[in-house]
């Protein structure tokens, strides 16, 4: 039987509730073919309160020896500022492991009524490729004259040719494996350096993919089009910030932020990729046992697929579709009354239904 070493970081808030459910579903799905050796890392805001840091100084190095990382959520406002939690845990992991793309599928599951009443599952089926290590999240900037009326803060975006090209190339490859349409999203009329470079690189790389049609959109137009005509999107590629925002919009089109998964993929072989729900720690519902675990379970399925356990991954997706289609065991964000645990249990029952 194959064995995989998985680092588990439940993190904060509802991350601690959805990750154990995800682990149980994954174990049930792979039971016949693989063993998942989980190693729990209790990092996050509690760890910060005990030690003054979100993870140990060698935390990212500790993660390198695993086959994959299963991550919950980070954030404990108002107790720890959000920029401290994000920059103390998730962003250093993405950057130091060079997890260069964040793949975020968006699709309407059968039985779910999203906010777009005239759109069905065949209309809402796209994948976002988010640049994941630089752009607006480069962390370049600073503040001067702090606390005075002359205070100034700078936040510089970074777009390197090397990085944008590999992200765009990844998106073209993905588009080629699907409906062969790529939408590139920038704001290059207003952002006249980095995003103009991005547009140029898209045009250059497009020459290697004559079978893929490309549409370039400004981010504001892209947001409007996602709502007006989501069927026009197949694969979309965008910067760290823009794709982060648009995938929350996409999750809303799916019916709930709790449904959306993401895969942070490593550029180098042998480096673990990280899989997480798109949602954060949701302090408003944390501790009540009602968080939707589907985004986390789906992220786990993406992890299994990445590890080569494609049949188990497919069975999990089918079980999620059956669950939403029967519409009986759903959490309150989807109009149901079920708990996180009950949804997990039902997904397991439906694995082989
Ligand atoms: N599930 C991971 C999580 O906690 N996400 C919250 C968040 O703020 N993420 C920022 C990002 O994905 O860049």
Image (tube, helix red, strand yellow):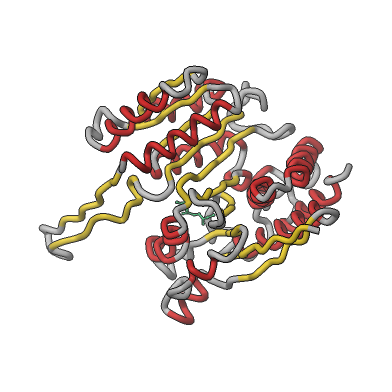
- Tell which residue pokes out farthest to the right in this image: 353
Viewer-proximal residue, 21 or 340?
A: 21
Percent position of residue 108, x then y: 65, 32
The N terminus lies in which quarter of the figure?
bottom right
Quarter location, residue 319:
top right
Instruction: Left or right? Give the position of 57 relative to 231.
Output: left
Residue at (43, 34) in percent of width and height: 168
Viewer-proximal residue, 93 or 11?
A: 93
Percent position of residue 242, x then y: 40, 39
Instruction: Left or right? Give the position of 152 relative to 212.
Output: left
Note whether 295 is above or below 67 in the view shown.
above
Residue at (39, 30) in percent of width and height: 185
Residue at (23, 56) in percent of width and height: 141
Residue at (44, 70) in percent of width and height: 79
- Tell which residue pokes out farthest to the left in this image: 150
Percent position of residue 140, x then y: 26, 55
Quarter location, residue 85:
bottom left
Percent position of residue 164, x then y: 37, 39
Note whether 113 is above or below 341 in the view shown.
above
Residue 175 showing in the rendered view: yes
The C terminus lies in which quarter of the figure?
top right
């Amino acid at each position: 039987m194959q064995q995989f070493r998985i680092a588990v970081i439940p993190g904060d808030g509802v991350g601690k509730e959805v990750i154990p459910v995800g682990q149980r579903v994954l174990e049930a799905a792979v039971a016949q073919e693989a063993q998942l050796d989980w190693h729990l890392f209790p990092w996050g805001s509690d760890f910060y309160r005990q030690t003054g840091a979100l993870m140990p100084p060698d935390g990212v190095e500790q993660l390198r020896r695993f086959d994959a990382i299963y991550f919950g959520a980070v954030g404990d406002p108002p107790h720890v500022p959000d920029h401290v939690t994000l920059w103390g845990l998730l962003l250093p992991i993405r950057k130091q492991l060079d997890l260069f793309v964040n793949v975020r599928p968006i699709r309407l599951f059968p039985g779910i009524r999203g906010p777009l009443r005239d759109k069905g599952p065949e209309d809402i089926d796209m994948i976002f490729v988010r640049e994941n290590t630089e752009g607006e999240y480069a962390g370049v900037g600073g503040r001067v004259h702090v606390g005075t009326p002359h205070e100034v803060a700078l936040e510089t975006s970074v777009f390197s040719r090397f990085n944008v090209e590999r992200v765009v190339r990844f998106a073209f490859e993905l588009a080629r494996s699907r409906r062969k349409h790529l939408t590139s999203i920038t704001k290059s009329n207003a952002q006249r350096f980095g995003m103009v470079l991005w547009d140029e690189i898209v045009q250059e790389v497009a020459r290697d993919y004559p079978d893929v049609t490309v549409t370039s959109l400004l981010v504001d137009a892209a947001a409007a089009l996602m709502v007006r005509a989501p069927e026009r999107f197949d694969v979309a590629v965008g910067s760290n910030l823009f794709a982060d925002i648009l995938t929350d919009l996409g999750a809303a089109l799916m019916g709930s932020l709790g449904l959306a998964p993401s895969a942070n993929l490593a550029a180098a072989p042998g480096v673990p990729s990280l899989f997480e729900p798109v949602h954060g720690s949701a302090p408003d519902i944390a501790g009540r046992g009602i968080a939707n675990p589907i985004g986390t379970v789906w992220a786990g399925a993406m992890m299994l697929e990445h590890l080569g356990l494609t049949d188990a991954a497919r069975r999990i997706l089918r079980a999620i579709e059956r669950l939403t289609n029967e519409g009986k065991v759903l959490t309150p964000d989807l109009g149901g009354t079920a708990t996180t645990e009950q949804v997990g249990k039902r997904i397991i029952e439906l694995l082989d239904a």
